[in-house]
Image: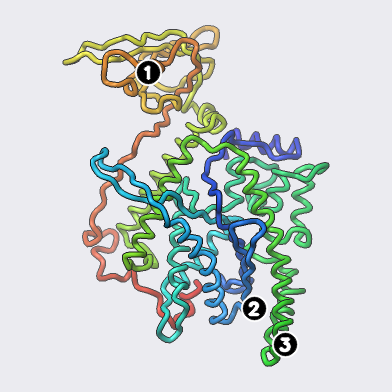
Amino acid sequence: MSTLRALAQAQALAAGAAQPVATVRHLHLSPRPLVLVPLAMAGEANAPLAAVVGTAPDRPRLLVVPQPRNRDQRYRFAAELAEEVLPYLDSFRDATEAVPVDRGRDVRHRYVDAPQLLVPNPAGITFLRLFGRSTRFRRPDGDHPVHPSVPLLGRWLTFFAERAEQPGSAALVALTEALTLHWATGQSAVEDLHLPALLGWIDPPPGSTGAEAAARAEDPTVCPPAGPATDPDFDNRHLAPAIAGYAAAADDPVARAGAYAELAGLLRDQLMPTWELMWRGVGLLRALPPGARVAGRWDGDRDAFTGYAEHVDAGGGPQPRRDGAVAAAVRLHRLERAAASYAVQRAYDDPLVMAEHRLTGEAFVGEVTLADPARVDDSGRRPVLRPRIQVVTTEPVLVPVGATLYSPARPAQKSKVVFVTPGADGKTEVVLELSGGMGRGLTAPPGSVPEVGERLCLTTLSDAFLPAGAFPATEETPWTHGGPPAGAVDAAPVADGDPAEEWA
């Protein structure tokens, strides 16, 4: 936890309300997200019990599994869920746009928008990941046939779960993580995973403090858990008798219909409070202006959605159960690059995030007191434009002479530290030589060089492109990692009759 976030949590506790830790919204919000609140049966490995799903607050659809231990009913639930998810995904595949590549010498096409799934908390993402794993290898024929939409749903859920691992991606979002990215509460990180309590701190009812609202929200009779877990008392007192009553009415259609209605009513009462809280949280996030680099990250989600849709259309196979050595290394490298880029972009977009780096000495803010925008360096083979500026700051300057700094106001420009002169009055003078972002001529365009009086933020954080690393081909896996693969073992599907792998 950073120093500023710890301070914000202390202030939240003292004030009785959550404190903002961001000035802009750091994730994309779709105008039409698909909200999904899953519920799983306790004591069973990812056995779906119910879900409420929809794209509008006033149009939820409740899906119920009367007997989660029944294999056929679980896959019937998957088929019903596919009826909601797959048409939603297809609705984004109507229009494409041309994107220039290879420096404008060629173009590629991608969809103009992409779907976005919202779940209450990280446990909801885990549920979808495991549910996708258990369904993407099913077949519509064989010993245990399923509806053809079930394996397709599993592949798409796996795609979204993998995108959720990508830092900065907004394809699959846990609402509690999105909210805590922008607000700090007076409770622990574990308590922040409870959506009703978290929203109690961020948006308490009139006349109540955040602590009071969170305490009331922790009462499962007032605000049931936000999925996928259920309350043990509810399981013992209400759910177990309702499921038993449905099973006992197997031979009486009228009694069975009544038992199903009773069970559906119980589960609706459990899920609808969270459904309403989800849209309330979405409204809070929508009120924040998006960061400048949010759209660029969403472009990456659109690229990924387009690429996987084309893979599915071309008859490509499902994702493997586990990655090979090279594939795992490539994935880890990609995630590390994305995490580094995401951290820099958030700091560039948000002064509150940049303030954390100012505390650690990775950035400082000062005022430009001198500027020589016409300075030319003719010591090389040809003269080049190298303006110099002097920045005076009251903050500690921990960067050495020769270091390269960057400014969020001009990310394409490099500032080389020439002199650092501490003053007796607590101020430090920093002389910088500028390069880049000024064209190729010997005259700087207006606004490309900071002017005297401009307040400038300078940091060691760079948003420059990070080249990908080099990895061996799959057939050249090093002996330290098992040697070349013996076959397509990683992509082998789960056997239809293996219940241990099915819902693991």
Pointer 2 or 3: first along the chain: 2
Taking the image as shown, residue 499 lies to the left or right of residue 235, namely left
Residue 497: mark: none
**Image quarter for residue 299?**
top left
Amino acid on which disc 1 is placed: Val
Q: Are marks 1 and 3 in contact (CB under 8 Å)?
A: no
Amino acid on which disc 2 is placed: Pro
Q: How far apart are marks 2 and 3 (CA)?
A: 15 Å
- Closer mark to the observer between disc 1 and disc 2: 2
Residue situated furthest front in the rendering: 94
Q: How far apart are marks 1 and 3 (CA)?
A: 82 Å
Taking the image as shown, residue 441 lies to the left or right of residue 79, namely left
Q: Residues within 10 Å of mark 2 (few under 14, many from 20)?
A: many
Q: Which of 330 and 39 is in front in this view?
A: 39
Residue 451 x, y percent position in the rendering:
44, 12
- Closer mark to the observer between disc 1 and disc 3: 3
Pointer 1 or 2: first along the chain: 2
Give SS at disc 3. Answer: helix
Amino acid on which disc 3 is placed: Val
Residue that mark 1 sits on? 417
Q: Total of numbered circles in the picture? A: 3
Residue situated furthest left in the rendering: 381
Residue that mark 3 sits on? 254
Residue 392 x, y percent position in the rendering:
48, 12
- Name the residue: 64% across, 65% down: 229
Give SS at disc 2. Answer: loop
Residue 66: mark: 2
- Name the residue: 63% across, 53% down: 193
